[in-house]
Amino acid sequence: MKDTISEVLDLNPKPKTTQIVEYIEDGPNNVRTDAELAKKNIRDLLQTGKETLEDLIEIARESEAPRAYEVIATLMKQMADMNSQLLELYKKEAEAGASKKDVPGELQPGTPANMTQINNTIFVGTTTELNKALERINNEHSK
């Protein structure tokens, strides 16, 4: 009895692919490299989880076993957590300024290219208050 799970469940197994990522210590850009690697790994895990989830749903439908649905719920929770981790990683990277500060000519995330900040305030108030202030000034100068 050497039947595999795929034969018993009449499923076509997907080929396994493995990619080896070489880690290179690169000094001050280490944070950026590590953040990019972490983001890529999380995205890859999410893609693998999605494919696995599809397979598990098919198995659960065929078997109608409560445990199969429990495994699906656990995997879905883990994938939701990984999505949160990915977004948190982007947020931390932007907060730390680890992504673009040391690269000349590149903008910080969320910074529009034509954004200009002007700190010169001449008058703060309503137009009525402005007219009254201008009248007072004109009256003082005309005396």
Image (spheres, rainbow, N blue to C red):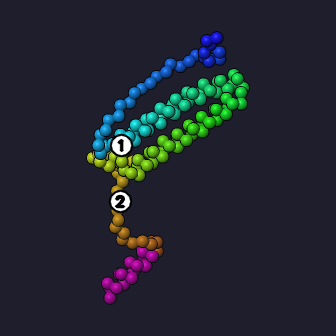
In this orientation, which residue lies closer to the viewer: 56 or 123?
A: 56
Indicate the amino acid at tag 1. Arg
Image quadrant of residue 133?
Answer: bottom left
Q: Residues within 10 Å of mark 1 (few under 14, many from 20)?
A: some
* Displayed quadrant of residue 76: top right
Q: Position of residue 122 (x, y in %)?
A: 36, 71
For the residues labelled 1 and 2, say whether their Cβ atoms are less than 8 Å apart: no
Q: Residue at x 43, y 49 (%)?
A: 92
> Residue 75, located in which quarter of the rendered image?
top right
Within 10 Å of disc 2 (Cα), the crowding (few <14, some 14-19, many 20+) is: few
Observer able to see residue 111:
no
Task: Please state the horizontal and vertical placement of residue 81, each as a whole percent of the image.
Answer: 55, 41
User: Foreground: 120 or 3?
Assistant: 3
Q: Quickly name the residue at label 1.
A: 32
Q: Position of residue 9 (x, y in %)?
A: 65, 17
In the displayed orientation, state which residue is furthest to the bottom.
143
Residue 40 versus residue 8 in the image, above or below: below
Residue 25 is left or right of residue 91, and the answer is left
Residue drawn at point x = 31 percent, y = 43 percent: 29
